Image (spheres, grey):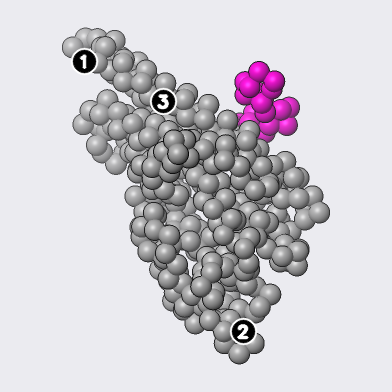
Amino acid sequence: MINRNNSIRFTDEQAMILESAREFCRDKSPVPVVRALLKTETAYSEEVWQQMVDLGWSGITVPEKFGGSAMGFGSIVPLAESMGRALLVTPFFSTTLAAQAILRAGSAQQQEAWLPKLVSGTVATLAWLDGEDWGADNLECKVTTDGDQYRLDGVKWHVADAGVASLFVVITEADGAPALALVTRDSLAESAITPHTLIDETRRAAKVDFTGVTIEASDLIRGEQVDSALHEIRLLGALLVAAEATGSAAACLDITVEYLKTRKQFGKLIGSYQGLKHPTVDILIAMDSARSHIYHAASVVDDGPMSNDAEIACRMAKALATDALTYAGDRAIQFHGGLGFTYECDAQLYMRRAQWAQQQFGDSYHHRKRLASLLLD
C-alpha cells in the first residue's frame, strides 16, 4: 500500500475490495433498512451476513490452511469504512477480532478447531470488560482449577453480539497472569446473558455472567504470548472502529450538505450562509485527515507482532476518526435545526454512533495520552 515515495496507494486487491464493498454496503443497507433493523432482536440481517461470508470477507485475515485468503489485516479497513458509511452492522467485527485472538495467542490445535468455523460464518466475540470502564485494565474474571477442568468466575460487560455468538473468547486471569478462555454458547446458563441498551441502537451488546462455567484444559490459552496478543487486539479493534467512524463521518457529511442545498430560510438556501459553510468544510477536512490516517495504519499493521510505528498509527487513527464523527454528528443535528433533535432525523443515527464509537477501545483522550509517551519520551 506504500510506494517508494511514502505515498499511500492501494494494491489491485485492496482497490477491488474497496470498490465491491462500497457497492455491496450501499445496496444492502440504505437508511430505511437500517431503521427497520433497529426494531429487531439482532439488529442485523442474517441473509446479508451470510452473503458477506460467501464473499470471503470472514476469512480475509485467516491463513489459507484454515480456509481463509490470508490478505492481511489492512485489507479489512476498506470493508470497515464502507460498512460505516452505510451504517451496516453484522457480527463481522466481533468475529474478526475473536479470530485474531486465536491466531495470535492460540495453539495449533485451537486454531485448527475454531478458525475454519469462523471463516464459514460461525459468530464469535470477545468478552473483554470486567466493568463499564473501557479504560480499565483490571481483570476480575478469574480461572481456577476444578479437578481436571477449569472454572470461570466473573461477569463481562458490553459483550458485542453476545446474543448471537456461538463462541466467546473470554479475557480472564489464571495463576495471576492474563489468559483466554474459549467458551461455547451451550456452556452458559439460560439466564447468563442480560442485554444492554446502547446509545447506538444499530448495535447489540450484553452483560454475560460466566460464573460457574467449566472448560477443558484444551480451551484455555495461556502463556507470555497472551499479553502481547491482547495489546495488539486492542489496537486492531481501535483501527476497525476508526475506519468505520471515518465512513460514518463521510455519510453524515453527505446528508448535511444535501440538507444545506435544499432548505431555505428568508428566501435563501441556508447553505449560502458562511456560518454554515465553514463548519461544513471543517467536517470535510477532519474526515479526510482521518481517512489518511486509517489507510496509513492499514499499510503498517500486519499479522506479526505490532511495531511501534503501527501502534502510533492505530492510536492516531482512532483519536482523529472518532473526533471527526463526533463533530460531524453534532453539526448535522445543529444544522437541521429543530428537526435535528427529533428521533426521525437521520442525523441522530450518526451522533449516537459517534458517542458509542468514541468509547470503544479507548476514547481520543486515552489514545492521545499514550501517544505522548510514544512520540515524546
- Quadrant containing the C terminus in the rendered view: top left
Are the residues tagged 3 and 1 within 8 Å (C-beta)?
no
Q: How far apart are marks 1 and 2 (CA)?
A: 70 Å
Mark 1 vs mark 2: in front = 2
Residue 47, x across and y down, in percent: 61, 50
- Quadrant containing the N terminus in the rendered view: top right
Q: How far apart are marks 3 and 2 (CA)?
A: 52 Å
Q: Nearer the viewer, residue 373 or 241?
A: 373
Q: Residue at x 52, y 30 (%)?
A: 293
| Label of residue 265 in the image | 1
Say what amino acid the circle numbered 3 marks.
Ala
Label 1 element class: strand
Q: Is residue 6 magenta?
A: yes
Q: Is residue 183 magenta?
A: no
Residue 341, x across and y down, in percent: 24, 37
Q: Can residue 104 be seen in this view?
A: yes
Are the residues tagged 1 and 2 within 8 Å (C-beta)?
no
Give the residue at mark 3.
Answer: 286
Q: Is residue 206 above or below residue 29?
A: below
Q: How far apart are marks 3 and 1 (CA)?
A: 28 Å
Q: Residue at x 68, y 56 (%)?
A: 103
Residue 27: name its quadrant.
top right
Q: In this view, does 24 lie to the left or right of 361?
A: right
Q: Earlier in the sequence, mark 3 or mark 1?
A: 1
Q: Which of marks 1 and 2 is nearer the N terminus?
A: 2
Give the residue at mark 2.
Answer: 149
Q: Nearer the viewer, residue 319 or 206?
A: 319
Q: Residue at x 62, y 72 (%)?
A: 220
Q: In this view, does 202 lie to the left or right of 185?
A: left
Q: Which residue is drawn at 53% across and 69% down?
A: 177
Per the rendered image, the range of residues in magenta is 1-24
Are the residues tagged 3 and 2 within 8 Å (C-beta)?
no
